[in-house]
Amino acid sequence: MSLYGRDANGNDAYIRGSGSGSTTDGFVTFHDTFSNDIKFATVAQAAATATSDLVSAVSAKKLRVLSLTVSADAACSVKFETGASAAIIAEDIYLPVNGTVTQASELGLFETALGDKLMISKTGSANITVSISYREV
């Protein structure tokens, strides 16, 4: 879907939306930019689980993370890994009790190896929730 109209500030804007608006397939709006290739993923990881898949592998593509939010109910550390080899692509993010960390970069924070899945690994016994926006490149 593509619309031409005014943004919240009254400026001319092209708006492109894709997805269903759910937490796993949200709507993204860009001012004067067409981009419908941003995707979303969320995983809630129980205290007993150490490693979880966040995004499945896509053949011949890298998964570039543009933004992330990590929250925990107890102190822990979380790192992002690529593929079956569990190579670390983002070092430990330390969270305090009931802590939240948010990071974003329009150029990307980190990316997986070509054709690898994106995983999270946690130390500590916290329940965590991880939400990301990413692009296949």
Image (tube, grey):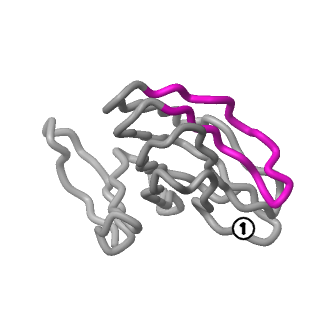
The answer to if 91 sits in the magenta stretch is: yes
Give the residue at x 39% y 39%: 72
Q: Quadrant of the C terminus?
A: bottom right
Q: Tally the marks.
A: 1
Location of residue 72 with respect to 52 vertically, above or below: above
Residue stretch in magenta: 76-95
Where residue 61 sits in the image (x, y, percent)?
76, 62
Check disc 1 and report the residue beneath it.
57
Residue 73 falls left or right of residue 89: left
- Location of residue 90 (image quadrant): top right
Q: In which quarter of the image is the N terminus?
A: bottom left
- Looking at the rendered structure, the secondary structure element under dot 1 is loop
Where residue 123 sits in the image (x, y, percent)?
60, 38
Location of residue 33 with respect to 99 vertically, above or below: below
Q: Nearer the viewer, residue 91 or 35?
A: 91
Give the residue at x 63% y 46%: 121
The answer to if 66 sits in the magenta stretch is: no
Where residue 107 sits in the image (x, y, percent)?
60, 35
Amino acid type indicated by mark 1: Ala
Alpha-carbon neighbours of circle 1 within 10 Å: few (<14), some, or many (≥20)? Answer: many
Location of residue 97 with respect to 26 vertically, above or below: above
- Secondary structure mostly seen in magenta is strand
Q: Nearer the viewer, residue 118 or 66?
A: 118
Location of residue 96 with respect to 18 vertically, above or below: above
Give the residue at x 56% y 29%: 93
Q: Which of 105 and 82 is in front in this view?
A: 82
